[in-house]
Image: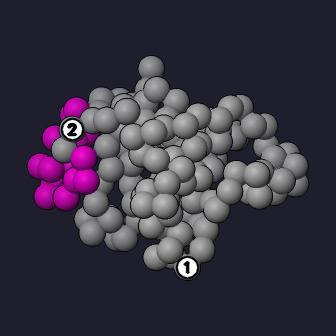
Amino acid sequence: MEVLRLDHIGIAVESLDDALPFWRDVLGLELAGIEVVEEQKVRVAFLPVGDTEVELLESTHEDGPISKFIERNGGPGIQHLAFRVDDIEEGIAYMKEKGMLMIDENPRYGAGGASIAFVHPKSSGRVLIELSERE
Ligand code: ZN
């Protein structure tokens, strides 16, 4: 497995409407699009910057992972870091071989058409890490 770049930084927000004025209007990042990923109960805003991206994550359900994160965290904040890898299947196998605990043992659909898998924060210093493969 090769890590190619920092793919995106996932930031949990209470609401995209409330968060966008800072990221788009103050920082001046371009809002490239918004996608609902129903399986993950999340609405994602994409703001590319250089060869990476800020992803703002708004929960679409009270029991979604982003809602739970905001509750545990005591408010919005950085939720995960995603690394672009050359091969997601190989990445999962590699992590397991290294003794890492995976949340996803099989790749699943991620925003923007990526193929993704999360590493359990227990294995990565309490930082939620996403592996992401994209065309
Ligand atoms: Zn992500």
Q: Position of residue 16 (x, y in %)?
A: 70, 51
User: Magenta span has 59?
Assistant: no
Q: Is residue 15 visible?
A: yes
Rendered-image quadrant of the C terminus: top left
The residue sitting at the top extreme is: 135
Q: Which residues are magenta?
A: 89-104
In the rendered image, which quarter is residue 89 located in? Answer: top left
Residue 25 sits above or below residue 65 on the image:
above
User: Magenta span has 102?
Assistant: yes
Q: Which residue is mark 2?
A: 106
Measured Cα–Cα span from mark 2 to mark 1: 31 Å
Which amino acid, mark 1?
Gly
Is 28 placed left or right of 119 in the picture? Answer: right
Is 13 placed left or right of 101 in the picture? Answer: right
> How would you rate the neighbour count of disc 2 (Cα within 10 Å): few for under 14, some for 14-19, many for 20 or more?
some
Q: Position of residue 7 (x, y in %)?
A: 51, 40
Q: Nearer the viewer, residue 67 or 81?
A: 67
Residue found 19% across the figure and 58% down from its top: 101
Q: Which residue is mark 1?
A: 74
Residue found 79% across the figure and 43% down from its top: 29
Residue 85 sits above or below residue 99 on the image:
above
N-terminal label among 2 and 1: 1
Residue found 37% across the figure and 70% down from its top: 126
Q: Nearer the viewer, residue 106 or 8?
A: 106
